[in-house]
Image (cartoon, helix red, strand yellow):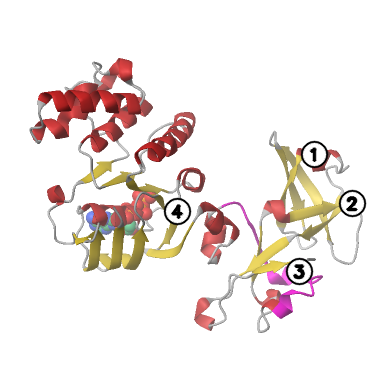
Amino acid sequence: MSISIQQVSKNFGSFQALGNINLTIPDGKLVALLGPSGSGKSTLLRTIAGLEKPDMGRIIINGQDTTNLDIRRRNIGFVFQHYALFKHLTVRQNIAFGLDIRKHPAKQIKNKVEELLGLIQLQGLGDRYPSQLSGGQRQRVALARALAVEPQVLLLDEPFGALDAKVRKELRSWLRRLHDEVHITSVFVTHDQEEAMEVADEIVVMNHGKIEQVGSPQEVYDHPATSFVMEFVGEVNILPGTVGLLDASAKHDTILPNVHPSQTQVFIRPHDLEIHCESDAQNKPAIVKRIIHLGWEILVELELPDGREILANISREKFAHLPVELGQVVYIKPRHARYFVDPKSNAYTSEPLTVNG
Ligand SMILES: Nc1ncnc2c1ncn2[C@@H]1O[C@H](COP(=O)(O)OP(=O)(O)OP(=O)(O)O)[C@@H](O)[C@H]1O
């Protein structure tokens, strides 16, 4: 069931929480709404659910305009950050809840509950009460309860937000596998870019109540449409163009004839920064300030001649062949860099700047 959000705006008093949102969520996809706190993710999710009414615009689910449809008639499954299980009901009774109140036949309910217990891998725990479950297990039950009534779409608001990092990580891959089994159109809210990258088919990056970009995890990472997306999704060094790291490139002028990188900020991913021991015409000197071993890669903190810091990520293998020490002067060169020009200036671009081929 696809979801089409058309020109949706929502204000709280004079504050605009959503500004003219247009978004299509294709049938069967798992889509993440990603953005910083206050960017409007939950408001958008709650608007799809019918928990908020938009001031303007329409929400079409499976071809039906649901904008003014009562929440109970939207057939939407909702999972919140804080497990809203009924404490006095067992796991089985919790999962059966929606089917019981819809007066489904007992045999059908029993079969459905057992099927869902299998799906959430909690077969042996059906008779426990929520207080006898871990946080992760409770969230899985909450998900099974939402799925029991076979909703058209599933909406999840920071479903793993209250769990510790390890359980969170386990549940992410579990959610991905579960979605691959049930293929229900799902939208989940997160402010964690790694979570969005790992779980979602498509990521909707939001900022200040607006959509900055919609794309696959790879698209938003490799081809960020705006400087905000580049900064929010993945690590990045942001330097004034005047720092001169790109002066060696002859290519930038041809890509953006009207704007020189020195007139704007330059964005360089730490893994796109090469470190050399010898100087040449295309690299720039920097001092090694810190070397951090992260296990599978090495993070090198460098200081540029003007005192600015810049980070480089290099693989263990490369590092083994690079005899760098603290305080040493090395020579750095970005493999790729990007710069963004204010869209209001009409010279907006997200074109990559390929340095040295
Ligand atoms: N009922 C409300 N009344 C007034 N302001 C609200 C209401 N709900 C949300 N807001 C405001 O709208 C903005 C967007 O809130 P929203 O919860 O959608 O953000 P979010 O991106 O989900 O943030 P978070 O990650 O912190 O949950 C925030 O500034 C919030 O304070």
Q: In this view, does 73 lie above or below 284?
A: above
Question: Can you see residue 161?
Answer: no
Q: What element carries label 3?
A: loop
Disc 3, disc 2: CB below 8 Å? no
Expressed as whole percent of the image width and height from the top left, the position of residue 354 reads 72, 66
Task: Tell us which disc is closer to us: 2 or 4.
Answer: 4
Label 1 is placed on what type of residue?
Glu
Q: Residues within 10 Å of mark 4 (few under 14, many from 20)?
A: many
Instruction: Tell me what residue is drawn at x 43 percent, y 33 percent.
Output: 174
Labelled pair 1, 2 in contact (Cβ < 8 Å)? no
Dot 1 or dot 2, earlier in sequence: 2
Residue 299 drawn at (x, y percent) = 71, 44
Q: Distance between the residues labelled 4 and 1?
A: 33 Å
Q: Tell me, for residue 277, which label it has, or none.
A: 2
Contact between marks 3 and 1 (CB within 8 A): the answer is: no
Type of residue at label 2? Cys
Discs 1/2, front: 1
Residue 50 lies left or right of residue 351; in this view the side is left
User: What amino acid is found at the position of numbered circle 3 in the picture?
Assistant: Leu
- The segment highlighted magenta reads 234-254
Number of marks in the image? 4
Residue hosting label 3: 246
Q: Is residue 200 left or right of residue 87?
A: right
Residue annotated with mark 4: 202
On the image, numbered disc 1 is attached to which residue? 317
Name the element at disc 4.
strand
First along the sequence among labels 3 and 4: 4
- Between the residue at mark 1 and the residue at mark 2, the CA separation in whole angstroms equals 16 Å
Which residue is at the far left?
Answer: 103
Q: Where is residue 50 in the image (x, y as percent from the top left)?
A: 20, 54
Q: In which quarter of the image is ligand 1?
A: bottom left
Labels 4, 1: front one: 4
